[in-house]
Image (cartoon, rainbow, N blue to C red):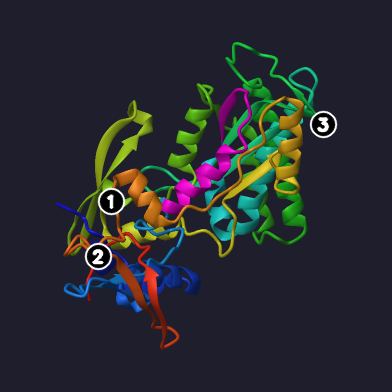
Amino acid sequence: MCVTPALLQQTIFAHPHIQSFNAYSRAVFTKLRQCHTAQIGMHRFQCDQGECRHTHWQYHSCGNRHCPNCGSWKKEEWVEFKMADLLPTGYYHVVFTLPHELNALIMGHRRCMFKLLFQASSHTLLTLGKDKKHLGAEIGITSILHTWGQDLSFHPHIHCIVSAGGISHGSWVAEKRKNRKFLFPKAMLQDIFKGFFMEHLRKLYKMNAITMEQAAFENVLKTIGYKKWNVYAKAPFGGPQQVVEYLGRYTHKIAITRHRILEITEKAITFRYKDYSDDNKTKEMTLSLQEFLRRFEQHILPKGFVKIRSYGFLKNHNKHARLNALRQKMKLPPAPPKVRIPVQQRMLEKYRIDISRCPKCEKGTMLLMETVHPYYDSRIKKSGSVMVSGDQNHSP
């Protein structure tokens, strides 16, 4: 069956079970339920041809980062901006995963535990990068937090895109391993990551940032202390284009997309997933709607929490000036300016669809006549503006 946004909204995101969640999660589900409906606002467009005057109502998107229907244009724009940060060097993909014994602790302290995961993974990479045995320079890191497995289980981990070369005293230091078989020794990655995380986890407990009975906390530390922590260094990227393609797939990804959902009934939902423990085979899973919503809600990030972060020579402070000075030393052209491309232009370039053209007479231009904001109960007249929204399939 074809799983439409409306079916998701009416059957899943309006389910009564959502009322058992916390206030912030309920607010997120409200946004997902209202996405592309009159409840969230709309534009009224009209054809400028006198003999046509076709009217079209365009519903607003919710723009929430957990929404299965939003984010594609934001993702493309973010990737384009990131392309300006790429330098002519190798890039590696490293994944830091926490032991599953920490899941219950993380669920109760998401903000500080996710923050610690970012700190531990970036510290590990930066420490080894500065070691002269490996590079002796400050590398560039883009880190992306994911909290899910393919079956929507709770599986916190960090994906890192790491430069093979780095900066030392304002000059570029080229990668030492020209064969690019590996970035840093895996055992060192594991030991530094585990040591830093456990040390700072103890500090958080002493500061009362973590609430847990001492005996239970010590038991968790003892259990994870005996385990080998998983740091997975994937094969290096073939070049900058591969980096960009990877960024596009992973940065704005959510727990599950609509395209993986096969069927929704009144009581259950069936979706596809990859079983990484069984040779990456594609399988199907059926869950009750309540269980699906419970798993989905686990991956709603804390309010305002930043899930994509940069470190090393890619850190945000003075990044533009720093990279351009480096490019000049490397005799490379400066990075192109960042330009926000309107949706109308993107649709024309990517799909060869002119969304400003009237869908009825195919001659006139759709002009924005008014914007309706239900939450403010006001209408803003903006006669004469050209249509810049791409969805022409809705009408009230």
Q: How far apart are marks 3 and 1 (CA)?
A: 46 Å
In primary-sequence order, the first of circles 2 and 3 is 3
- Residue occupying the point 38% across, 74% down: 384
Q: Give the range drawn in magenta.
A: 73-95
Say whether residue 349 is visible: yes
Q: Where is residue 52 in the image (x, y as percent from the top left)?
A: 17, 72
- Residue occupying the point 70% across, 48% down: 316
**SS for tag 2?**
loop
Q: In this view, does 218 lie to the left or right of 351?
A: right
The numbered mark at residue 122 is none
Q: Which residue lies furthest to the top in this view?
A: 179
Q: Which of marks 3 and 1 is in front?
A: 1
> Which amino acid lies under the numbered mark 2 shown in the image of this protein?
Gly
Number of marks drawn: 3
- Residue occupying the point 55% across, 62% down: 302
Which residue in the structure is indicated by mark 1?
Answer: 353
**SS for tag 1?**
loop
In primary-sequence order, the first of circles 2 and 1 is 1
Label 1 environment density (alpha carbons within 10 Å; few <14, some 14–19, many ≥20) = some
Which residue in the structure is indicated by mark 2?
Answer: 364
- Magenta region includes residue 113: no
Q: Which of 35 and 387 is in front in this view?
A: 387
Q: Residue furthest right?
A: 169
Q: Is residue 345 left or right of residue 225?
A: left
Which residue in the structure is indicated by mark 3?
Answer: 170
**SS for tag 3?**
loop
Q: In this view, does 154 lie to the left or right of 165?
A: left
Q: Nearer the viewer, mark 2 or mark 3?
A: 2
Label 3 environment density (alpha carbons within 10 Å; few <14, some 14–19, many ≥20) = some
